[in-house]
Image: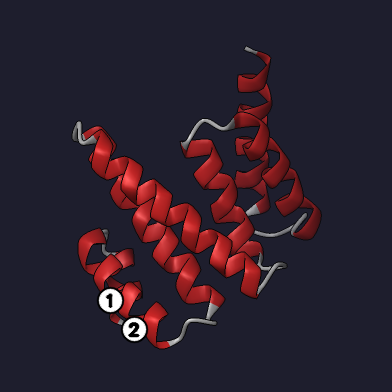
């Protein structure tokens, strides 16, 4: 619906509002929780870039909460696992990022997202070495 539209338009405040309503209306829909998590993550990145660390921290916390909710409803969702790995990468939680990228690649070894996941995995592996 509208939440996904606003997410694709990079209007994250509106995306959060509509996706939050959708998640309340359909609490067992893992895809909605994943999209809401992505909206929170992207809004958090903007807050961090805008020197609003408290807002970013709140958005990142909500992102992780909704990713966890999505995975509890659909533990094999490649989309959710990919976004969880992105979350860890954004948070510079390199060990968790590496583990989650490997988990994604085990499930989706040859998809359009696997090349990107492999690049991110290499970044996480290198970051852990430093």
Q: What residue is at 60 percent from the left and 21 percent from the top?
A: 127
Taking the view exactly as shown, the residue that stands out farthest to the bottom is: 25
Which dot marks residue 1?
A: 2
Q: Could you tell me which secondary element the residue under label 2 belongs to? A: loop
Q: In the image, is 71 to the left or to the right of 106?
A: left
Secondary structure beneath label 1: helix
User: Residue drawn at (57%, 52%), measured in percent from left and top?
Assistant: 84
Instruction: Please report contact status of discs 2 and 1: CB closer than 8 Å, yes or no.
Output: yes
Question: What residue do we see at 55% from left, 41% from top?
Answer: 88
| Neighbourhood count class around disc 2 (C-alpha, 10 Å): few under 14, some 14–19, many 20 upward | few
What x and y, as percent, mark residue 120? 60, 37
Q: Nearer the viewer, mark 2 or mark 1?
A: 1
Q: Is residue 115 left or right of residue 16?
A: right
- 71, above or below 123, in the image: below
Rendered-image quadrant of the N terminus: bottom left
User: In terms of image quadrants, where is residue 53?
Assistant: top left
**84 and 107: which is toward the camera:** 84
* Colour basis: secondary structure
In x, y percent, where is residue 62? 40, 56
x and y, in percent, of residue 49 in the image: 25, 34
Farthest top residue in view = 130
User: Residue 113, percent across and down?
Assistant: 62, 55
Q: Residues within 10 Å of mark 1 (few under 14, many from 20)?
A: many
Quarter placement of the C terminus:
top right
Residue at point 21%, 68% (across, down): 14
Tag shown at residue 18:
1
Q: What separation in Å lies between label 2 and label 1 (alpha carbons)?
A: 8 Å
């Amino acid at each position: 619906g509208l939440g996904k539209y606003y997410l694709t338009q990079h209007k994250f405040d509106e995306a959060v509002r509509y996706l939050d309503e959708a998640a309340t209306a359909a609490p067992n829909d893992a895809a909605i929780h994943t999209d809401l998590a992505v909206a929170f993550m992207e809004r958090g990145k903007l807050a961090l870039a805008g020197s609003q660390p408290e807002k970013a921290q709140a958005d990142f916390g909500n992102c992780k909460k909704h990713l966890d909710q999505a995975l509890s409803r659909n533990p094999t969702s490649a989309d959710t696992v990919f976004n969880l790995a992105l979350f860890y990468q954004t948070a510079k939680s390199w060990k968790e990022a590496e583990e989650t990228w490997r988990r994604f690649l085990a499930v989706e070894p040859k998809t359009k997202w696997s090349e990107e996941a492999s690049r991110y995995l290499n970044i996480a592996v290198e970051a852990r070495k430093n």
